[in-house]
Every structure is written in C-alpha cells, then in structure tokens.
C-alpha cells in the first residue's frame, strides 16, 4: 500500500486522518518537530525544522503522497503583528521547505494535497448570497485572504517538478475533539445559546469525517487537481447553528443570548472580523468530481457528533 507523509499529523484534522488512513491499510509517516511514538507500527515519525529549513530526507524518499496540514492556529491567539507573522510564516515557510525537499531529494512522490481555507474569500455581498463563492474567484484583500493566497502560491513550484497539487479550502470543521464546535458548545453547557453579532452570518462548515474522507478521495482519484472547497453543501447561519446545538444538548432548557458585535471587537480585536463575517461557499466542484457527503446538513452532522 502507498505511504502517506503528513505534516500537522498530531492536530485536530491530522489525528482523524491518520486513523482513517490506517483503516485503509496505508503506511503513514508523521513529520514533527520532535521524535514521538505511535502504538501502530505502520506509523513512523520523521523530524523537520521549518526555521532551519531541514527535513528527514529518508521520509521524503519513502513517501508516495504528501498531505500538508501544518500551520499555526488562526483562532488560537489575538492577532497581534507578531502573531499574524507567525500565522503566515508557519504556512509559507513550511511550504517552501517541502518544495525545496522535493526538488533536492530523490523521490517518487505522486501528489501533494495541502490544506488551505475559505478565508481565501471575502464576505458575502448580500445575505443570503445568490452566488456562493467558487474556486475560480480571486483571493480577498484582507489578512486571511492574502495569507491563503501566499500559502497556496508557495506550493505552486511543485507542479514544475511534475507533481500533482491539490489545495483544500476548508471551512469550519465540526469535531468533538476540539476546534470551533468546542467553542460553540462551551456556553451551552451553562444553558446559554450565544448568538454572535446579528447571527445572520452564514457559516460554511464540514463534519470532520467528511473532511477526512475528502482528503482520502483526493489521494485516490488522481485526475483531481487545483483548488477544491472542502465545505458541506448546506451552509447555515450562526443563529440557526447555535440554536440547533443548544437544542441537541439541552432540549428546551437554554436561553438564547446575543453577543453584540462591539463586544466581540473588544474581546477579539481584528479577529472579530472573521467571527462576524458571512461566507457562503460552494462545494459543487468537489461534488461534481464524484465526492458524496455523509453529513450534508447540520441535523445529520449534529446527530452523528452526539452519538
């Protein structure tokens, strides 16, 4: 079976993806800053140092495919000038390291599948948006739009080496193991359904299982190239999402609470722009490529997460 090299393999998406790859009998190499151990013998670890621009040459030579997930968490800290630089550098410099490694180290890598984000797109021009964002639209001029552009462009030289390149513009990932869902449900445990701003902003989301399946689908279908929006087919607005989560956890025993936009701006600074942004993103390209969603709507996704 093929060998998959994964960066960011210990993160939210990476952990689920590693487990799914093992179920399908793939060999997995996780690239990490430190040597770790995994209970499954089909998983090995390799070292890299993004600052020093070094990576285990043996790992590159063994890999058939690379899945690149590494990058500093966008929502982990307030967006200071220093943090914004960390967000950009962690993506661009890691991509530059992979490009250099593929160029310098003899290998038989067939494809590179890289994470990107729907932060590529700007805000909806209207709510509802009659024309959801598609992959052929240019990057927005704001911080995340330009970060995604630099992120994706830094991997483009791989195509000159004859490697297939796919970029997964990922929406809000719903998982019980962390990420956005944890933040949405934290107040619900105290009986509060916290609606952010107007609550009308559209959220383009994807269940973690569908995202993992999409990555594997892209690996196994070699005709796929370029950018794909990794989002479910039915975006939902913030208010509806929060109310449905609250109902699933508390039944009727919760109180809807609006958090005004100005409060979020005080709490989060510039990052509040993304929290309040409405982005209706289209997944038709991925669907047309033959991918089917296990959880196409929020009801089925929440039911699965509550099992």
Image (cartoon, grey):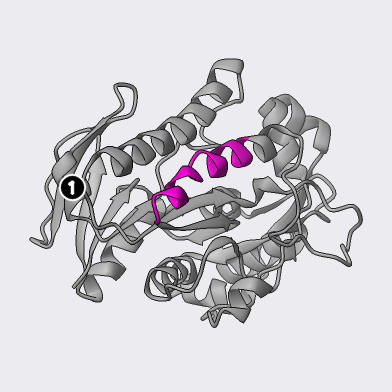
Residue 149 counted in the magenta span: yes
Task: Residue 135: give x, y in percent of width and height.
Answer: 68, 60
Q: Which residue is found at the position 83% from the left and 56% from the top?
A: 200
Numbered marks: total: 1
Residue furthest to the left: 41
Does residue 245 appear left or right of residue 24 in this picture? right
Q: Which element type, helix, strand or loop, lies under badge 1?
A: helix
Tell me if I can see residue 72 in this picture.
Answer: no
Image quarter of residue 249: bottom right
Task: Residue 276: give x, y in percent of width and height.
Answer: 76, 44
Task: Residue 77: give x, y in percent of width and height.
Answer: 53, 28
Residue range highlighted in magenta: 147-162
Up/down of 178 relative to 149, above or below: below
Does residue 198 appear left or right of residue 80 in this picture? right
Q: Nearer the viewer, residue 102 or 279?
A: 102
Q: Main secondary structure of the magenta part?
A: helix
Q: Which residue is found at the position 24% from the left and 57% from the top?
A: 108
Q: Which residue is found at the position 48% from the left and 27% from the top?
A: 89
Q: Residues within 10 Å of mark 1 (few under 14, many from 20)?
A: many
Task: Residue 28: give x, y in percent of width and height.
Answer: 21, 59
Does residue 73 appear left or right of residue 35 in this picture? right
Tell me if I can see residue 109 in this picture.
Answer: yes
Residue located beneath label 1 in the image = 59
Image quarter of residue 98: top left
Residue 115 counted in the magenta span: no
Q: Nearer the viewer, residue 30 or 182?
A: 30
Q: Which quarter of the rendered picture does the N terminus lie within?
A: bottom left
């Amino acid at each position: 079976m093929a060998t998959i090299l994964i960066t960011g393999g210990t993160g939210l998406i990476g952990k689920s993806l590693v487990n799914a790859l093992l179920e399908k009998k793939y060999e997995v190499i996780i690239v990490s800053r430190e040597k770790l151990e995994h209970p499954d013998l089909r998983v090995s670890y390799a070292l890299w140092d993004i600052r020093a621009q070094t990576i285990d040459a043996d790992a590159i030579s063994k890999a058939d495919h690379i899945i690149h997930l590494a990058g500093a968490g966008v929502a982990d800290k307030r967006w200071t000038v220093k943090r914004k630089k960390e967000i950009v550098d962690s993506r661009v410099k890691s991509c530059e390291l992979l490009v250099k490694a593929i160029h310098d180290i003899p290998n038989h890598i067939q494809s590179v599948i890289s994470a990107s984000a729907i932060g590529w797109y700007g805000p909806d021009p209207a709510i509802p948006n009659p024309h959801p964002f598609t992959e052929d639209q240019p990057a927005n001029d704001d911080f995340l739009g330009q970060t995604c552009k630099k992120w994706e462009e830094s991997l483009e030289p791989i195509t000159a080496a004859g490697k297939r390149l796919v970029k997964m513009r990922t929406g809000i990932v719903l998982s019980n193991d962390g990420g956005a869902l944890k933040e949405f449900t934290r107040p619900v445990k105290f009986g509060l359904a916290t609606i952010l701003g107007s609550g009308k902003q559209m959220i383009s989301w994807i269940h973690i299982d569908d995202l993992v399946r999409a990555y594997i689908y892209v690996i196994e279908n070699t005709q796929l190239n370029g950018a794909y929006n990794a989002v479910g087919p039915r975006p939902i607005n913030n208010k509806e999402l929060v109310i449905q989560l609250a109902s699933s956890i508390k039944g009727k025993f919760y109180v809807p609470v609006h958090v005004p936009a100005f409060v979020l701006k005080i709490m989060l600074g510039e990052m509040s722009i993304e929290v309040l942004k409405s982005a209706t993103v289209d997944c038709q390209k991925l669907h047309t490529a033959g991918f089917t969603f296990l959880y196409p709507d929020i009801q089925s996704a929440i039911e699965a997460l509550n099992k």
